[in-house]
Image (cartoon, rainbow, N blue to C red):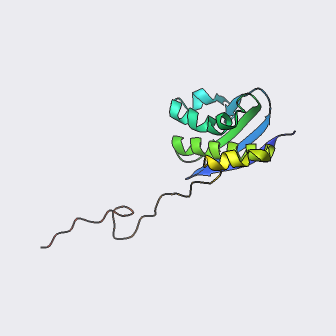
Amino acid sequence: MSTIQTVGKRKCSIARVFLSKGEGKIEINKAHSLQEYFPREFHQRSVLSPLKLTERLETYDIKVNVKGGGITGQADAIRHGITRALLEAESDLRPQLKSAGLLTRDPRIVERKKYGHHKARKSCQFSKR
C-alpha cells in the first residue's frame, strides 16, 4: 500500500491527510505532534475518533497539512480527512463509519452579513419615536 491522500473540510478549515502503513504516528503541519497542536483533550479525541472506532490506532501513520479557520474547525477537518482516507484504504469499514456519522461533511458555515443590519441577523435598535 502506498500513501493515500485525501482532503477533509469543516467551515473554513481544509486538511490534507496522508495515510500510510506504520505504527500510529500523527504529524501535523510537518513539525507538531497531535498533543502539541491540540492541547485540549476534546480536540484530540475528535481527531482520533475514526481510528478508535475502527480499532486502527497503531496501524497507520498520518501526516496532515491543515490551514484556515479555528482550532475546532481544524480538528473536525482532520477527522473528516482521516475518515475518508480509512475508507479508501479499507472499503469494508464503510458501514461502521457511516453509522457513526463520520462520512458526511458538516455543511454549516457562517451566515453572511446583510445590509441594514449589524451582523447576519442582529438589527439596529428599534425606537418608536
List x then y, in percent, for residue 17: 71, 42
98 w.r.t. 127: above or below: above
List x then y, in percent, for residue 119: 37, 61
List x then y, in percent, for residue 100: 61, 46
Who's the residue at 52% across and 30% down the image? 41
Query: Is any atom of residue 102 visible in this view?
Result: no
The C terminus, quarter of image: bottom left
Relative to 22, 99 lies left or right? left
Who's the residue at 70% across and 49% down the image? 95
Query: Is any atom of residue 117 visible in this view?
Result: yes
Who's the residue at 72% across and 36% down the image? 63
The N terminus, quarter of image: top right
Residue furthest to the right? 1
Residue furthest to the bottom? 129
User: Quick one: 99 or 42, which is closer to the camera?
Assistant: 99
Residue furthest to the left? 129
Who's the residue at 46% across and 62% down the image? 111
71 w.r.t. 38: above or below: below
List x then y, in percent, for residue 127: 16, 69
Number of labels in the image equals 0
